[in-house]
Image: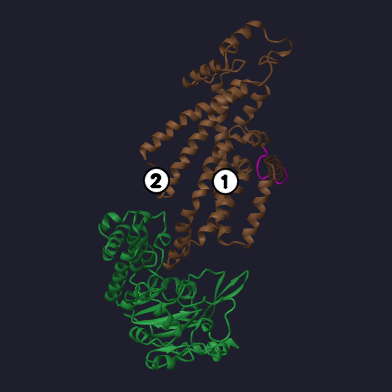
Chain colours: A brown, B green
Amino acid sequence: MGRYLLRRLLQLIPVFIGTTFLIYWLVWSVPGDPFAGKCGDRGCPDNFREVMTAKYHLNESIWVQYASYMKNLFQGDFGITFSGRSINDIIVTSYPNTLKLAVVALTIEAVIGLSAGVLSGLRRNGFLDNLVLVSTLFLIALPVFVVGFVLQWLFGVKWGIVTPTVSNEMRFTELILPGFVLGSASMAYIARVARTSIAENRRADYVRTAIAKGLPMRRVVGVHLLRNSLIPVVTLLGTDLGALMGGAIITEGIFGINGIGRQVLRAIVTKESATVVSIVVVLVVVYLLMNLLVDLLYAALDPRIRYE
Amino acid sequence: MSDILVSEQSAPGADGSGRPSGRLLEVDDLRVEFRTRDGVAKVINGVTYHVDAGETLAVLGESGSGKSVTAQAIMGILDTPPGFVTGGQVRFHGKDMLTMSAEERRRIRGEGIAMIFQDALSALNPVFTVGFQIAEQFRIRRGIGRAEAKKRAIEMLDQVKIPNAKDRFSNYPHQFSGGMRQRAMIAMSLALDPEVLIADEPTTALDVTVQAQIMDLLAELQRERQMGMILITHDLGVVADVADRIAVMYAGRIVEQADVYDLYAKPAHPYTLGLLDSIPRMDEKGQQLRTIKGLPPNLMNIPPGCPFNPRCPMAQPVCREKLPPLLQIGSGRSSACHFAEELVNRD
């Protein structure tokens, strides 16, 4: 197990370098003058151009630029924006907000998605099963901004149950609705995967054995059936945290949350390439670590998987 | 037409009235059908048998004859849908299990009637340790604490002769060999000291060398605990050593029921005769193996008359018209053949 973990951690290094380089290269090779529009109508003064060109090695090859970026990164320095603001600052203020939102979304989708999936998988073709199938189809088919605006209008404006936007304090109660919107599509997938998995394992021999042992139904389902059916659901949930954080742009926009989605959008529009790269690099790290966590969870759920 | 004839089958052991008869476990005129998209398969068509304490009943038959489905119906673990019990009774201590509440029935499982399955690898839960799955019986069914349950589970593993039971407790099913897994399965089913044990082809998935060991173990435990045992098998060699009585099934019916010695000495049904004839014999080495010609009938379309008539070497016109009821012939044995007397009395 220890050796496996070490090997997996070492594998993260080339993946990390590969993905971050691709991002860096793609972002910085967007055609156009990086200084265009940065200093109002008159164009940037020459000394500003010189300082920034030197800072980002803009006259050097992409490799040198990337290497110097990485060197600073490992010293904990994400660089500065063209206006001189520290990118560390942007990340520290915006990431926790997005993380909070994503965790709320993940919790909601895990609880609701899993319960709906288990209940409908146990009674296939029943009323609840059909309800789950139809409603998940809706959630999957509708774009997130439609779900977002409709629910915001219904709950925030028409019925006034919640405030339509999220305040800077990011209170938990304010995050329930945006969390639901952000997690809605994944929730539908979780429900469907859990449903299939439960329905498949329901007829398994070991479930029959558990019934033949005279165990109460809630134990047969809650212990014997659920543990086996959770394995595919865990994959989905684990890899989803990264996807939720990356996908929060629209939800953050709708509910006025100051998260990375808003920051990255602003950075793309204003060609703050350093900011875009830095935000995405942190996302990559989250992705990679969650993937590793999922693989380790597998072994915990299924003892037949052994890592040597 | 055929239904009226079939109902005559409830001959031996049962009085058909549902009154307690002092038997431990009785199956009385049980009927099961599978409703599938292609039609209704009549899988069990009036099966009647019983087992008493300390006695082993072997249920013999080809695959598809309904021997396992009968056991599943007794346990209440039939896959529904497609399987439905459409008639008959299953009485445990005289009480019909098919009409009692789900909760009452659940309590009988494991404690009154326990079952072991053919393939222990798939029948044991892959993600829990063997010890957990045995100790679970003590903890959940008897409310015994974790430490004490573990102690008892290790005792059970000891009783089924698993070496190093203490260390094996925390192994997972996939870490056991096939024979060990079946032993663990036996330990699990015997944990609550059941009165009846149903063993559904317990040795079919095992190596020949291990088969004998498991059968010996089962026979020994059955004797020690004075359990009633229903041994479902298609292996005539296994049956001879351990069974007291044999019920032979064909197309969802019992075609012959007899004492082991009587059945081997003088089969009273051509199907039983065919089965016995198809056992490979050392003194006929080099000759072609004998088989019963043809295939079992399609259960969605069982032929009229005796269901065995298309394959029967002794078939007469009457066999294609009239379904032979299971009738008593001599003491303690019965046969569902029009020519049972002739068969028994021939040399």
Relative vertical location of residue A288 with respect to residue B104 in this rendering, above or below: above
Element type at mark 2: loop
> Image quadrant for the N terminus of chain A?
top left
The magenta stretch is A157-164
Kind of residue indicated by mark 1: Ile
**Residue underneath mark 2:** A306
Answer few, some or many: residues within 10 Å of disc 1's Cα (few below 14, many 20 plus, some between 14 and 19).
many
Label 2 is found on which chain of the structure? A
- Give whichever of B134, A260 is nearer the camera: B134
- Label 1 sits on a secondary structure element that is helix
Q: Chain of mark 1?
A: A
Q: Describe residue A244's horizontal placement relative to residue B196 as left or right.
A: right
> Residue shown at 48%/55% (left/top)?
A226
Picture quarter with the C terminus of chain A: top left
The answer to whether one can see residue B328 in this image is no
| Residue in view at x 48 percent, y 70 percent | B77
- N-term-proximal mark, 1 vs 2: 1
Spatial CA span between label 1 and label 2? 31 Å
Majority SS type along the magenta span: loop
The extreme right residue here reads A41
Residue neighbourhood size for the residue with mark 2, other residues' Cα within 10 Å, grouped as few (<14), some (14–19), many (≥20): few
- Where residue B58 appears, as percent x and y from the top left, is 38, 78
Label 1 or label 2, whichever lies nearer to me, is: 2
Left or right: where does residue A35 sit relative to residue B108? right
Give coordinates of residue B142: x percent, y percent.
Answer: 35, 66
Residue, disc 1? A108
Q: Quadrant of residue A66?
A: top right
Where in the figure is residue A74, as x and y percent of width and height?
A: 47, 21
Q: Is residue A163 magenta?
A: yes
The answer as to whether the residues below labels 1 and 2 share one chain is: yes
The type of residue carrying mark 2 is Arg
